[in-house]
């Protein structure tokens, strides 16, 4: 289990570095208006969307690490059954067993 926590912490550190760079990139929004088609605006909007996605991912990783540290990390958050070790090896931040994940996508 500690290996899984270390993998998740490493992933979280990488995401935090990316978020820091994106925060710098979106700190100043390019000016645009009617007739001012600055391509920097498109990049700013893309960076902002990526930042939001990474923030959500970081929150999920933090929650998963907390679940692991509390001893609940190998249990499905929906049904409470153990998550198969092979699934955890491929998706270390998953919180759902295969059956509950299938239900979610159906």
Image: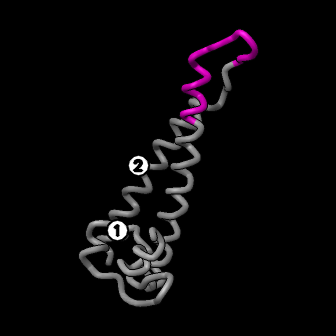
* Circle nearer the N terminus (2, 1): 2
Q: Residue furthest right?
A: 34
Residue at 45% x, 49% y is: 15
Applied colour scheme: one colour
Q: Residue furthest left?
A: 86
Residue at 57% x, 25% y is: 42
Q: Residue furthest front?
A: 106
Where residue 63 appears, as percent x and y from the top left, is 52, 70
In this view, the residue in front, 49 or 37, is 37
Asked whether residue 27 is drawn in magenta, I would say no
Where residue 8 appears, as percent x and y from the top left, is 38, 63
Residue 6 horizontal side relative to residue 37, left or right: left
User: Residue 68 falls in which quadrant of the image?
Assistant: bottom left
Where residue 20 appears, as percent x and y from the top left, is 53, 41
- Whether residue 25 is visible: yes
Residue at 48% x, 72% y is: 104
Residue at 57% x, 40% y is: 49
| Label 2, label 1: how far apart the Cα atoms are | 15 Å
Q: Which residue is mark 1?
A: 92
In this view, the residue in front, 100 or 28, is 100
Q: Secondary structure at mark 2?
A: helix
Q: Is residue 18 above or below residue 61?
A: above
On-image quarter of the C terminus: bottom left
Boundaries of the magenta span: 31-47
Residue 11 horizontal side relative to residue 86, left or right: right
**Which dot, 2 or 1, sits closer to the camera?**
1
Q: Residues within 10 Å of mark 2 (few under 14, many from 20)?
A: few
Q: Residues within 10 Å of mark 1 (few under 14, many from 20)?
A: many
Q: Which residue is mark 2?
A: 14
Where residue 57 appears, as percent x and y from the top left, is 50, 56
């Amino acid at each position: 289990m500690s290996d899984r926590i270390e993998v998740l912490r490493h992933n979280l550190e990488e995401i935090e570095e990316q978020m820091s760079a994106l925060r710098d990139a979106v700190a100043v929004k390019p000016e645009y208006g009617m007739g001012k088609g600055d391509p920097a605006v498109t990049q700013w909007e893309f960076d902002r969307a990526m930042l939001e996605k990474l923030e959500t991912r970081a929150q999920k990783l933090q929650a998963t690490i907390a679940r692991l540290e509390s001893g609940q990390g190998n249990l499905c958050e929906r049904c409470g059954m153990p998550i198969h070790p092979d699934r955890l090896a491929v998706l270390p931040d998953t919180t759902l067993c295969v059956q509950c994940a299938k239900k979610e996508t159906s």
